[in-house]
Each structure stands twice: as C-alpha cells, then as structure tokens.
Amino acid sequence: MAPELTKVKVQSCGPGSTTLPPSSVSSCWPPVRPRPAPIPTACTGPFFTADGVIGGRYEDFAADLKTAIPEPAGTTLVLFNHGTSAGGLDQKCRPQKALPRFFAILPKNLPEAVLYYPCSDVLGGSSGAGQSRQIYQLRGREIAALLDRFMAHGVAPGRITLVGHSGGASAVMVAAQAAQAADKLAAFVASAPGHGYAYLGRDAGNNPILSGQVYGWRQALKEATGPGLVFAYEGDRFSPPGDLEFLAGVDGIELVGVRDARCGRMRPHGFFWSPCFAERYGELVLQFLARHGGLSLPPAVAARIITAAARPKADTKPGPEVARRLLSGLGKQGFKITKSLRRKLQSYLELPAHKALAISRSGAWASATNRLTPEIAIADAGRRCTRLGPKCRLALVGEEIVKDEERE
C-alpha cells in the first residue's frame, strides 16, 4: 500500500532562494533580505556634549546636529540605544534618566566626544511575525540608516561607535552587519543583547514559534562583524549568559562574562548602570573606544571618568523643613498653595534626582526631575513654566528655594 502523501504549504522565497522542509526553523535559504530602511528625515533625541545637553524629543534634528557637532571631522560619536520590550510597545525614551552615568559623563571629560541618544518609536511584530518584522531588526535598520545623516554632516565613520543595552544591544548588532560592511562604523558595545522572550524560561525553548524566533535572533547576531564588545551578566533572566555563548566563536567579537553581577539593589540586567560596572569594566570600555573608535584618552582623564562614574550616589533626601520653608515663602509672596502641592511636595523632594519646580500665582504647578544634571531639570521646568503662563516662576532648584521675582 502506497504511503499517504501530506500536503505541504510551500512559501514563496523569491529569486535565488530555495524552500526547506517544513521541519526546518526557517523555510527559506538563504533568508530573504528585507529592504533597507529609508534614511530618517525626522529624528528625535538629545545630544550630550561638553557644553551640556542639546536638543531632545521635540527639537529639530538638523539644527541640533549643527549646534552639537560644529567640527564633525574631529568628533568622536557614540550612539546609545535604549532597550525595549519584544514588540516595542513599552519603549520609554528617557535619555536624561535612562542613560548610564558612565557614558553620560564622557563628553564632560572628553570635549571631542559627543553622545547621541536616538529615541525610537518603531513597533515590531509579535512572536508569530517574520524575522524581518522583529523589533530589533527594525530598529537595527533604523540605526544603520541614521548613520548616513551623521556621515553626510562630516563625521568620520572610523570615529563612530554604537552602544546598546538589551533589545537596543541586539539592534546595534543588526545595524553593525550592514554598517561595518559599508565602512560606516568603527565598532560596537553591546550590553546584554536579548531576543525578548527569555523571561518565559523553558517555555521559550519548548514553544515551536518562540524557538524559531530565538534561532533567527542568533543567526542575525552571528552576522555582526567586529570589532565588538559584548557583556553578559550572571543571573540575568532577560538576557541569560547561556543564550549568548554562541558569540564566543564569532570573529571580531569579545564576549565578557560578568560574574557577581549585582551591585547594591541593582539587578543583573541593570548592571550596566551600576557604579560597579564603571569600577570593574570602565577601563576595558574606554580602552576599546580608544583602540577602535578614534577616542583620544589621556590616562589621567580615563581615571577621572572611572572615578566619577564609580562613585555611589549620595543620599541627599531633604528633611520636611525644606517643604515647610518653601510653602511658607510662597504663601507670603501671594502664591496660592493647592492641596495637591501640599500633599505631593515632600515625596517629590525625596526623589533621588536633580529637581526643579515651577508655580504660577493661581496655584498651578509643574515639576521636573533629572538624574544626570540640574541644568536639564531646570530647562525642563522652565518650558513647563512657560506653558503655565506669565505669572509663573521657578520656585525650587534642587533643594534651593528660588527668591527671584516672577517671570515676565
């Protein structure tokens, strides 16, 4: 008796590709290459420079670029790429709060260095979507296309380094495939690159769809060409070191396994932000940037950067007398004090960040915080104050009560 034949749905793979059996993870080989992303015409995100932070989410990229990088030929550029969820639905682009301190202080100590934090709002496909629609693939193509804007401005490709964390690290490695092949990039640093499904544990490996996504992610990262520096953190449940072991055999990539990846209350996945990272691996990263990214690094400057980034943040929680003095002073000057301000002021003052508070005569108020510099908080509060009207002024900067007259 002849065996029963099973109908197999054949995927159209395009010219030059062949179909594989349905048991294979990918149904086309070679995989169909997605079309390149268009060059972004509207980019958002701030520049961190020696003169402070320039631009932001709602500023004009072209104008900010000229201001932040007036001498592109002598600039060393670092693009930092934030993490994201698997589908990109929870992307919180908070450059001033989410940028690791180690990288935030680079431009302040090395005037030639400029750091750009691109805010991506790309949304990727679900676990059932194709590889080309995964968020790290889409963001990787977005980053690669963004490099053309910097090169057109005159930044030398040999002085551009990509840095990314988690999903942003995977995007950086995807961007490095095309960028380094086209001589648009010097090197990359990837912290805990992930595929987005590791938090499911064994379920990710046992699920046929998810296992296919993990396989595709590995194949994509294998194509990244160095020089590259990749960090994997012991105990990281979102980017387990075991998921990254395959990178140890990729030419040009140095895989650094970090043991004891806890620092105070910092969990392993956030070790990149900790003072322990700067203390233990700051020298390695700086030397990597100097060796491959064109960064001039005097020994004294390197030591100063590491010392500053490795210094634990001091506990500067103000006592309740600060809130009482502020409210009393505002009341004497004729400002209406609302119940919401009385109720929330103390907890706001205790936030571990630089603070600025604006208030109008009518009692409307707005607050701003920033973990990097007071200048950013003040500028943010100033913009909010402008929206509150002409009777608004800054009432608080950090813990200092501002006694200036109201804004004109």
Image (cartoon, rainbow, N blue to C red):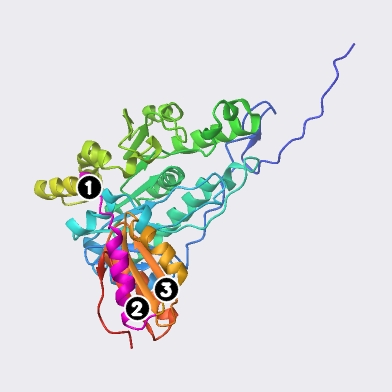
Which one is nearer the viewer's eye here, 337 or 30? 337
- Residue under label 1: 309
**Residue 208, how many percent across, how many down?**
65, 29
Q: Indicate which disc, 3 or 2, sits on the residue closer to the N terminus.
A: 2
Q: State the CA–CA distance, disc 3 to disc 2.
A: 14 Å
> Looking at the image, is 307 positioned above or below residue 407?
above
| Mark in front: 3 vs 2 | 2
The crowd level at tag 3 (other Cα within 10 Å; few <14, some 14-19, many 20+) is: many
Query: Does label 1 or label 2 sit earlier along the sequence?
Result: 1
> In the drawing, what numbered circle is on residue 8?
none
- The residue where tag 2 is placed is 331
Element under disc 2: helix
Identify which amino acid the numbered label 1 is placed on: Ala
Asked where in the image residue 326 lies, by quadrant, the reply is bottom left
Residue at 61% from the left image edge and 47% from the top image edge: 125
What type is the residue that disc 3 sits on?
Answer: Trp
Going by the numbered disc 2, the residue's amino acid type is: Gly
Closer to the camera, 251 or 201? 201
In magenta segment, residue 126: no
Q: CA distance from mark 1 to mark 3?
A: 33 Å
Whichever of callouts 1 and 3 sits on the residue coming sooner in the sequence is 1
